[in-house]
Amino acid sequence: MKILMDIKRSKLGRVILLSAICAGSLFASPSQVDKTPDFAPFILDKRVERENYNLRLGPVFVDIIGTFGIEYNDNINTSEVAPISDIILQPGISLGFKWQMNENTEVDLNLGLEYWYYLTESDLNDFSNSIGLTPNTELSFRVLVGDVAFRVYDRLQYSFDSADSVVVDPVTGNVIDNDPEAFTRFRNVLGIQTEWFIRETIFNAQLSREDIYSPEDIFAYVNRHEHKAALNVEHPLAANFLVGAGVSYAIVDFDEDVNNDGTIFTFGPYFDWKITEVIGLYAGIAFNDWNFDQGALTDTFGDQSQLQDYTWMVRLSHVANEVFNHQLEWYRAVNVSNTANFNIVDGIRYTAAYNLTPRIRLDAAVGYEESESSGGLLQNNNFDRWIAGISTEVVLGPRLTAEIGYRYIDKTSDAQFQSYEQNQFRIFFKYDF
């Protein structure tokens, strides 16, 4: 879940807010990335993994995957009062390169591109709102020195959303719903990770810098930098029981004085328990201390909130048999907001997978979330949201697969023009060369 607002002061003393709400259950795209919110410091940046490499150019292994999607969306602008429907064509390509320099050194380059073409809303088909870099675009260098593994990586994503704009008069508080606007932004994460073993104990550390940048001047308020240091330690108490603890500290710095800068300190324990051969339980809890500066525009709208609260994740998984598995997740997360100091998200999600035949798999998911905003530029931006979806993946050949899916979102917000319903149907093909 992300809440993205375009904030702009005009000579008439207005503030323009562009709300782009993105949440996923089964579909993934430049603007819709499904993941459980990060809730604790031991969620470190994971390396991009590829299953197979199908070509070789000298010492470099190459993996090429072509994709093509057709999506019908009955509310592309996530509007409460005037939804716009469209059919979107989504061709894409994923490239992977691996150079094993020696037994201790490896270089990986992964690139994912998607192109979006709107059949009806042609005004959304400009270059900046058509080609996206997917989250698995990454360059990484790994080296093993003694018993310590080092990884230096740079991950780049370019994404876009289209949503109705909302104009708020800060004097009267009147709200007006406008036509869809395109919101584009880059996200880049540069970091270094280390992993080392002392007998059975595993130590992981990370230093990283995350940059959010929009090339449009009217979206400059979202530009920010986050510097983070994290450490977590894991130790197996038994063959089926792993315990760990993590700690992190982050500094959030916005370029403009629209949002408050701040610091985030988090620490907490977790465990991963294989209760039986078919039942697993993962649970973690973390204490969060968020401190924010004052003086930005969000203060004008009354948000001087600080936060000391707990976040958690509980995941119960069950492999019923060879063809059916499912899991239940319960979580609380805190997110940096672009219209307030923070948002608190409480959610529950159930997912299941059933192999109908060796060539056909059925996936389903249903989830409910409640989000509470600390205040800020869009007052009372508290909402609850249902997300449900079902899809089937069919193996059409040794290299070709197809997926047919449906997703439904129902969001009810306390803020004006922030509630909406959305139905999405998608056919997606993937060819692994």
Image (cartoon, grey):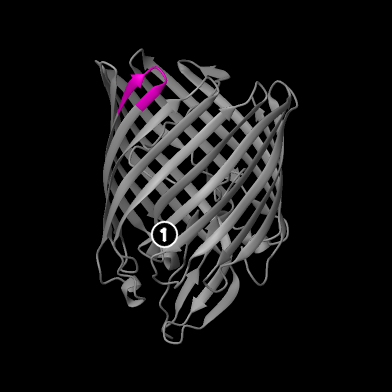
Q: Which amino acid, by three-letter code, is at mark 1?
A: Asn
Quadrant containing the C terminus in the rendered view:
top right
Left or right of 183 on screen, residue 214: left
Q: Main secondary structure of the magenta part?
A: strand
- Seen in the picture, residue 172 relative to 317 is either above or below; the reply is below
Q: Position of residue 395 (x, y in %)?
A: 72, 26
The question of residue 271 being in magenta is answered with no
User: Does residue 229 appear anywhere in the picture?
Assistant: no
- Seen in the picture, residue 431 relative to 100 is either above or below; the reply is below
Please give the range of residues in magenta. Answer: 234-242
Q: Position of residue 410 (x, y in %)?
A: 63, 59
Q: Find disc 1 in the rendering and name its residue.
A: 343
**Identity of the residue drawn at 32% across and 53% down:** 225
- Seen in the picture, residue 167 relative to 73 is either above or below; the reply is below
Relative depth, front residue between 355 and 339: 355
**Identity of the residue drawn at 34% across and 50% down:** 310
The question of residue 238 being in magenta is answered with yes
Category of crowding for the residue at label 1, using alpha-carbon neighbours closer than 10 angstroms: few (below 14), some (14–19), many (at least 20): many
- Tally of marks: 1
**Identity of the residue drawn at 38% across and 48% down:** 311
**Identity of the residue drawn at 51% across and 60% down:** 183
Relative depth, front residue between 404 and 313: 313
- Seen in the picture, residue 240 relative to 265 is either above or below; the reply is above
Q: Position of residue 392 (x, y in %)?
A: 72, 36
Left or right of 231 on screen, residue 14: right
The answer to which image quadrant residue 309 occupies is bottom left
Relative depth, front residue between 270 and 121: 270
Q: Position of residue 375 (x, y in %)?
A: 39, 69
